[in-house]
Amino acid sequence: MLEEVFRDEWGRVLASLVGFLGDFDKAEEAAQEAFAIAAERWPTSGVPANPGAWLVTTARNRAIDRIRRERTLSEKIHLLPVAETVMDEFEDTVIKDERLELIFTCCHPALPLEGQVALTLRSLGGLGTADIARAFLVSEETMKRRLSRAKAKIKATGIPFAVPDAHLLPERLDAVLAVVYLIFNEGYSGRVDLSAEAIRLGRVLAALMPDEPEPHGLLALMMIHNARRRARFSGEDLVLLDDQDRSLWDMPQIAAGRTALDRAIALGGRGAYVVQAAIASLQTAERIDWPQVAELYRRLVDLTGSPVVELNRAVAVAQAGDPAAALRAVDRLDLDGYLYLHSTRGELLRRLGRNDEARAAYRRALELATSTPERRFLTRRLEQL
Amino acid sequence: MQYALAIYIEPGYEDALSDAERDAMYAEYLALGEDPRVVGGARLQPVETATSVRVEGGRTLMTDGPFADTKEVLGGLALIEVTNLDEALELAARVPAARLGGVVEVRPVMPR
């Protein structure tokens, strides 16, 4: 229970402290101190009415004490605007939520992508360094270095703790969404639950930017995908959408995803995440409207120019009843090293009754397959021909 | 905060421009130079004029040409005074070389 409060409050408390102290390391230190005091006191004294405000006040006071102790007060106090007054006025002031500033700082494009990801999980998600290291299969030492390098660059280069100006916002928001989606996809293959973590971040982002469509779109996309996670594998084996056991789908999560999607569309969202969420939503319908899915994939091709998306569009065209047109689209793609191009060709050729060519395509796919479930799936397809 | 912009160019990139385009580019550089946030800078002579110097065991070794053999070469430097990295990056993106095959490296200056 206490742990839950901590996880929920960490991002907000840290954001407020970074804003106040202008320094990630000092903020983290102060936050940790405050959380430690809370862990000691709350079990006996009870959780305060506003745990976040309590934690921020305590952490700020500790940070100020520490700076005083360091006896460089006279030198540093001018770096702490309004420090004294804030302390007194604090009791009944609502803490300004500065998590958005924190997100944009952590996902600044001047930082290496892996640093952005790690720092976002650490600062906003409140994950420990060891947990993040485990999730990304690197040593704790490596992850520690990655985090401290990112923090050092923020400090040395003057990356602002701010929400970017309107003219920079679209580009910078894209960077933030990319980090969250990357975290989500890390978790999809099932190690530490990074997908749940990404959804938490997505919720925060959508709540903090209620009028921006794409955060709602991303949240919708993640929820609808995640809701089908348990149905995607049978033991070790991949299960295709058609064959998935729908009773394993998390229906409330799909409904929540659809609500977020509706909101994104109502806000005029037509970007890549909104379109992908709309596709995912259509694919959870009782009877899938494949022509509509194909049309959305066409939009997505226009937005991304990605041949992999075009491949998905071709699959939707085939599902809509035109495997010949789908095959023509697939054969225009320059994706020879891509496993799913060949498995898709195999399936299309099979449907068109061209079994010899289908076998050849599946064999080529098998050459490219690296994971055991994939190999097993393709072998089964070959045997069925 | 002060930042240095190291402006790297592809040698001869100007040759590909029409006279009008080149004039427009120079006008842009002039305008940037007059921006009050630009506190110093220099445009360098072509890379053929470079000599690299190093001292080893008390001996001064000189080689003709730039220190690193790369496609882009240092073409100029600017020193700017802005509030944060975002502002520095915006100014860097306005340097014509950045969109003409070159690249602008942005580095904060050590406080003195």
Image: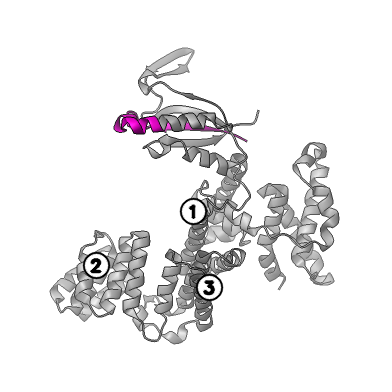
Image side of residue A246 versus residue B38, left or right: left
Question: As shown in the figure, which amino acid type bears the numbered disc 1?
Answer: Glu
Q: Quadrant of the C terminus of chain A?
A: bottom left
Q: How many marks?
A: 3
Q: Dot 2: few (<14), some (14–19), or many (≥20) neighbours within 10 Å? A: many
Q: Is residue B53 above or below residue A2?
A: above
- Disc 1 crowd, CA 10 A, few/some/many (<14, 14-19, 20+): few
Which residues are the magenta region? B1-24
Q: Quadrant of the N terminus of chain A?
A: bottom right
Residue at 53%, 82% in the rendered image: A252
Residue type (three-letter) at the residue carrying disc 2: His
Q: Position of residue A117 (x, y in %)?
A: 53, 56
Give the percent coordinates (x, y) of residue A336: 24, 60
| Residue at 37% in and 76% down | A237
Q: Which residue is mark 1?
A: A171
Name which quarter of the figure residue A376 lies in.
bottom left
Looking at the picture, do discs 1 and 2 lie on one chain?
yes
| Tag 2 subunit | A
Q: CA distance from mark 3 to mark 2?
A: 38 Å
Label 3 with label 2: CB-CB less than 8 Å: no
Q: Do labels 1 and 2 touch, CB within 8 Å? A: no
Subunit ID for the residue under disc 1: A
Name the image quarter holding residue A123.
bottom right
Which sits earlier in the primary sequence, circle 1 or circle 3? 1
* Marked residue nearer the N-terminal end (1 or 2): 1
What chain does badge 3 belong to?
A
> Pointer 2: what residue?
A342
Q: Which mark is residue A263?
A: 3
Q: Position of residue A173 (x, y in %)?
A: 52, 57
